[in-house]
Image (tube, rainbow, N blue to C red):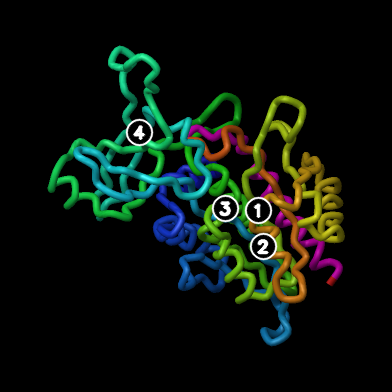
């Protein structure tokens, strides 16, 4: 229940790319009991650092990274009684018609929806929805609409987290906030442990746009190792990872093989359900960006299976988030043992 409550708070906080302030502030609050130093950088990434016992001048760092932005829309212009919007990050526009959304205008967000022309009003050959005709209706018009919703206003799904089936949850932004919840859980599990190095949890901004949050954080902290936790697509067709498979351990050209072996060893030692999650070089994620910085940063990906990726009704197993947190903490202790 505690994990569900944490995830509920994280998903309720709006965090479209470039506007992640609310969720960053929440992460800082949730991490406060377990971190020695918390700050939000100039781009908006929140960094929560647990200090190691080595002298600060020689202390190394394990980075636990999870991105905090979510799929969103942005108001591009006003059109009659509607807001014309464009997509930001990964959004399948075919899922948008009829969806309720939250327009983040000023201090009081507005409820809106993406209209769909009723079937009985369609002309022969006319489509009820076209990706090129994406608008939001907030029940205002004319000057009132322009005053209430300036251009550049972000729009997010209105899909509060809800329990689903046996031990699962459904809602928006789970592909990002599940990784955050796992990293925060790892920080909690490490509370009271004596580690020689710093452990830094980073809630990175703008992963869905340019991954600049993770890049700037890794450049600033210069971590010795990095573990990236994020949602990966779950499938039931036998060609990918399933919701019931536990954790997907990143395998492919973007991941350090030595660190991956440590992750696999810890998973086996602690009976953490896992399987390889094979990615190709063209796939973009924070792990790929981090590993190429400085002289190279050994990086591993912990994939949390999420069904309906980037949709308003993503589904995740709460146990998978807990497993990811346990795996992160276990890797930290394994690295400390070999220090």
Check residue 292 for magenta coloring.
no
Mark 4 to mark 1 CA distance (whole Å): 29 Å
Residue hosting label 1: 284
Check residue 328 for magenta coloring.
yes
Q: Which range of residues does the magenta coloring cover?
A: 312-338
Which-is-in-front pick, marks 2 and 3? 2
Residue hosting label 4: 100
Please report contact status of discs 4 and 2: CB closer than 8 Å, yes or no: no
Whether 271 is drawn above or below 315: the answer is below
Task: Give the x, y percent position of residue 141.
Answer: 16, 40
Q: Earlier in the sequence, mark 3 or mark 4?
A: 4
Residue hosting label 2: 289
Within 10 angstroms of label 2, few (less than 14), some, or many (20 or more) residues? Answer: some
**Residue 64's quadrant in the figure?**
bottom right
Please report contact status of discs 2 and 1: CB closer than 8 Å, yes or no: yes
What residue lies at 67% left-to-right and 62% top-to-bottom?
289
**Residue 123's quadrant in the figure?**
top left
Task: Give the x, y percent position of residue 43.
Answer: 47, 68
* Number of the label disc, if any, that sits on residue 180: 3
Give the farthest residue toward the left.
Answer: 143
Whether 261 is drawn above or below 195: the answer is above
Which-is-in-front pick, marks 4 and 1? 1
What residue lies at 57% left-to-right and 53% top-to-bottom?
180
Task: Give the x, y percent position of residue 198.
Answer: 67, 72
Within 10 angstroms of label 1, few (less than 14), some, or many (20 or more) residues? Answer: some
Q: Earlier in the sequence, mark 4 or mark 2?
A: 4
């Amino acid at each position: 229940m505690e994990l569900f409550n944490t995830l509920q708070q994280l998903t309720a906080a709006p965090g479209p790319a470039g506007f992640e302030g609310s969720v960053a502030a929440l992460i800082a609050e949730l991490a406060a009991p377990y971190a020695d130093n918390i700050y939000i950088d100039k781009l908006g990434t929140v960094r929560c650092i647990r200090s190691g016992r080595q002298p600060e001048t020689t202390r190394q760092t394990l980075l636990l990274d999870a991105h905090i932005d979510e799929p969103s829309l942005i108001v591009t212009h006003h059109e009659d009684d509607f807001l014309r919007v464009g997509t930001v990050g990964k959004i399948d526009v075919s899922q948008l018609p009829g969806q309720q959304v939250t327009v983040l205008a000023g201090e009081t967000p507005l409820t809106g929806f993406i209209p769909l022309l009723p079937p009985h009003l369609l002309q022969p050959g006319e489509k009820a929805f076209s990706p090129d005709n994406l608008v939001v209706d907030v029940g205002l018009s004319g000057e009132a609409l322009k005053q209430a919703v300036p251009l550049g206003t972000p729009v997010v799904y209105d899909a509060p987290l809800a329990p689903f089936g046996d031990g699962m949850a459904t809602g928006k932004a789970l592909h990002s906030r599940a990784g955050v919840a796992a990293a925060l859980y790892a920080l909690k599990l490490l509370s009271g442990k004596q580690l020689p190095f710093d452990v830094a949890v980073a809630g990175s901004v703008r992963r869905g746009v340019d991954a600049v949050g993770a890049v700037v954080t890794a450049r600033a902290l210069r971590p010795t190792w990095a573990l990236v936790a994020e949602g990966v697509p779950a499938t039931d067709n036998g060609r990918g990872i399933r919701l019931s498979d536990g954790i997907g351990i990143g395998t492919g050209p973007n991941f350090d093989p030595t660190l991956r072996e440590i992750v696999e060893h810890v998973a086996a030692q602690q009976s953490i359900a896992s399987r390889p999650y094979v990615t190709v070089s063209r796939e973009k994620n924070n792990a790929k960006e981090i590993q190429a910085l400085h002289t190279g940063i050994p990086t591993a990906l912990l994939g949390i299976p999420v069904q309906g990726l980037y949709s308003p009704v993503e589904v995740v197993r709460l146990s998978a988030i807990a497993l990811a947190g346990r795996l992160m903490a276990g890797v930290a202790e394994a690295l400390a043992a070999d220090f």
